[in-house]
Amino acid sequence: EAQVTQNPRYLITVTGKKLTVTCSQNMNHEYMSWYRQDPGLGLRQIYYSMNVEVTDKGDVPEGYKVSRKEKRNFPLILESPSPNQTSLYFCASSSSGLYNEQFFGPGTRLTVL
Amino acid sequence: GNSVTQMEGPVTLSEEAFLTINCTYTATGYPSLFWYVQYPGEGLQLLLKATKADDKGSNKGFEATYRKETTSFHLEKGSVQVSDSAVYFCALRHTNTGNQFYFGTGTSLTVIP
């Protein structure tokens, strides 16, 4: 089944404790992206990647890191999480053509205390 | 730059009512346009799309027509059901920014019996 998977789905952590949210897709997509969703603010893009070893900042990259060493994986790293990073996070992937839609993962709900 | 503006919610309708959610975009040329739906507790999933002017996307009774002259892609459904309660996002994808995606802020719809 074609899908985007994220782990963990739920995470409660404390300020300053490094964490990684994994994202993997099995559709051989070039394009991958991370978003956060907050009430009243819609979806905001954190980072995106056009292909392996190519990443770029989105609208709200501060406090986050990403890497794209393999085509299928695009982990999101919070080196020193803070409470303002409490949010619902979505990973998405897409083929690179203009007409192609993004496929979204199920989301990771992160709470930073 | 590219952007998407959609009507603010929340929207509350009675079952079998007619639905319109307005979406307008700012972009030069011919982006691809998408509507995504997010059911409670889930990730976003593609509802419909249109890739050129005057195209009509349709799915599950929902329709949207790509209007270049008004830069709009309004979502409509003739008779909503309780199961349509969700958040709806309008989005575009454009070659002028490397096939990046741009999302509206989302419109929450609640359908009451």
Image (cartoon, grey):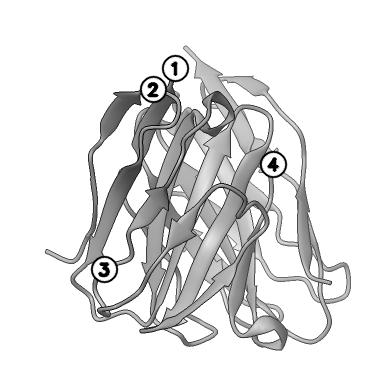
| Residue extending farthest top | B113
Residue marked by disc 3: A73
Crowding at mark 4 (Cα within 10 Å: few <14, some 14-19, many 20+): some
Residue marked by disc 2: A14
Crowding at mark 1 (Cα within 10 Å: few <14, some 14-19, many 20+): some
Left-right relation of B44 to A85: left
Q: Is residue B66 above or below residue A41?
A: below
Q: Position of residue B112 (x, y in %)?
A: 51, 13
In the picture, the disc for residue B20 is: 4
Residue kind at label 3, given as amino acid type? Asn
- Asked if the residues shown at circle 3 and circle 1 are in contact, with their CB atoms under 8 angstroms apart, the answer is no
Residue marked by disc 1: A113
Residue kind at label 4, given as amino acid type? Thr
In the picture, the disc for residue B18 is: none
| Residue extending farthest left | A1
Of the numbered discs 1 and 2, the one sitting upstream in the chain is 2
- Residues indicated by labels 3 and 1 sit on the same polypeptide chain: yes
For the residues labelled 4 and 2, the Cα–Cα distance comes to 43 Å
